[in-house]
């Protein structure tokens, strides 16, 4: 038996390279770079992804970019319901037939929403999921919009308890980087507002069709309470200001944000932060303290 097309122990038959290509040919699909269409064709990689997602039978999974259904089929073998958000109408229309053919009665757990994940709203998602709030995010995110999509969905869906995302390897390094490291930046800080991010491992480019020019990485997300009651938008504006000129001290980098370098220094000192420090040294909690002190001046 073709190992790539073999069924999971209690789940649907997965798509291997031959099945994936045949399905694309039937649809007349020509994957586009604009939509970030690189489809996983390796069944072992798919199993690794769903295992790392740590899903439960009662989970409502939000899958972004199901494509031809490689990951969708495996998710249906583990989760109670899967809502697949697909921006390409051709792929969204073809997915039900693929799932019905290969997943049997588990196909009843699939819901599909044709929408742009960067703009979709909570109300649309919940309605499409049959009135149920998503509890887990599993996604193969396009390289060009991976971070914006992730931040948008984390903000839009506070019901998410966990997530497993596949992103460009460089982006994965940024998402999991701790303060004081070279890769630590605005994405690291902003994701930390919502969740603890941990690297699960690399994904080689060879498991995709078409083969991308970069490798990927898996990042596991575990939700946690917001570190502050200060509005998130205000903290994120501060983070953006700090990293817009990351080589400068915070006193200088935050001068425009605070109104002057002198005011920035005062706010930083009241927050217990050295004005000569740089943004890459601060945790999300410290950024929240600075934003709170600045609000006290208003």
Image: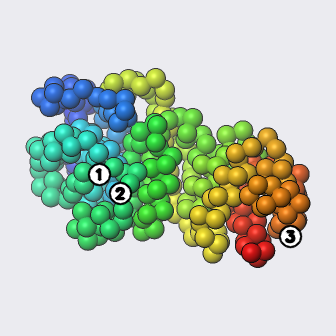
- Would residue 156 be found to the left or right of residue 281 on screen? left
User: What residue is disc 1 on?
Assistant: 115
First of labels 2, 3 by sequence position = 2
Q: Residue at x 52, y 63 (%)?
A: 223
Q: Residue at x 21, y 43 (%)?
A: 89
Q: Nearer the viewer, residue 78 or 262?
A: 262
Location of residue 6 with respect to 104 vertically, above or below: above
Q: CA distance from mark 2 to mark 3?
A: 39 Å
Residue 241 image label: none
- Would residue 295 be found to the left or right of residue 13 on screen? right
Q: Residue at x 24, y 54 (%)?
A: 113
Q: CA distance from mark 1 to mark 2?
A: 6 Å
Q: Nearer the viewer, residue 197 or 262?
A: 262
Q: Position of residue 145 (x, y in %)?
A: 46, 42
Q: Secondary structure at mark 2?
A: loop
Asked if residue 60 shows in the view, the reply is no
- Would residue 172 be found to the left or right of residue 246 on screen? left
- Quarter in which the C terminus is drawn: bottom right
Q: Position of residue 44 (x, y in %)?
A: 35, 35
Q: Residue at x 24, y 51 (%)?
A: 114
Neighbour tally class for label 3: few under 14, some 14-19, many 20 plus, Cα within 10 Å: few
Q: Position of residue 175 (x, y in %)?
A: 58, 46
Contact flag, marks 1 and 2 (Cβ < 8 Å): yes
User: What residue is disc 2 on?
Assistant: 120
Location of residue 219 with respect to 22 vertically, above or below: below
User: What residue is disc 3 on?
Assistant: 270
First of labels 1, 2 by sequence position = 1
């Amino acid at each position: 038996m073709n190992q790539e097309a073999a069924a999971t122990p209690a789940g649907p038959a997965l798509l291997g390279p031959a099945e994936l290509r045949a399905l694309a040919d039937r649809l007349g699909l020509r994957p586009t770079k604009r939509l970030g269409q690189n489809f996983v064709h390796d069944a072992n990689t798919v199993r690794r992804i769903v295992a790392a997602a740590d899903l439960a039978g009662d989970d409502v999974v939000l899958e972004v970019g199901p494509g031809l259904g490689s990951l969708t089929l495996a998710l249906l073998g583990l989760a109670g319901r899967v809502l697949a958000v697909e921006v390409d109408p051709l792929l969204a229309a073809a997915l039900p037939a693929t799932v019905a053919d290969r997943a049997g009665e588990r196909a009843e757990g699939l819901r599909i929403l044709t929408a742009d994940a960067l703009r979709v709203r909570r109300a649309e998602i919940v309605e499409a999921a049959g009135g149920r709030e998503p509890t887990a995010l599993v996604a193969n995110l396009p390289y060009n919009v991976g971070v914006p999509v992730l931040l948008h969905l984390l903000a839009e869906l506070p019901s998410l308890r966990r997530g497993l995302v596949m992103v460009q390897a460089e982006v994965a390094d940024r998402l999991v980087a701790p303060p004081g490291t070279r890769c630590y930046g605005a994405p690291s800080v902003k994701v930390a507002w919502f969740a603890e991010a941990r690297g699960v491992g690399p994904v080689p480019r060879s498991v995709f069709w078409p083969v991308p020019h970069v490798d990927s990485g898996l990042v596991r997300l575990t939700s946690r309470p917001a570190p502050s009651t200060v509005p998130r938008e205000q903290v994120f504006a501060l983070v953006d200001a700090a990293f817009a000129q990351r080589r400068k001290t915070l006193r200088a980098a935050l001068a425009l944000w605070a109104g002057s370098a002198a005011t920035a220094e005062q706010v930083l000192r009241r927050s217990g932060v050295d004005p000569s420090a740089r943004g890459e040294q601060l945790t999300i909690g410290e950024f929240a303290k600075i934003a709170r002190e600045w609000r006290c001046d208003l």
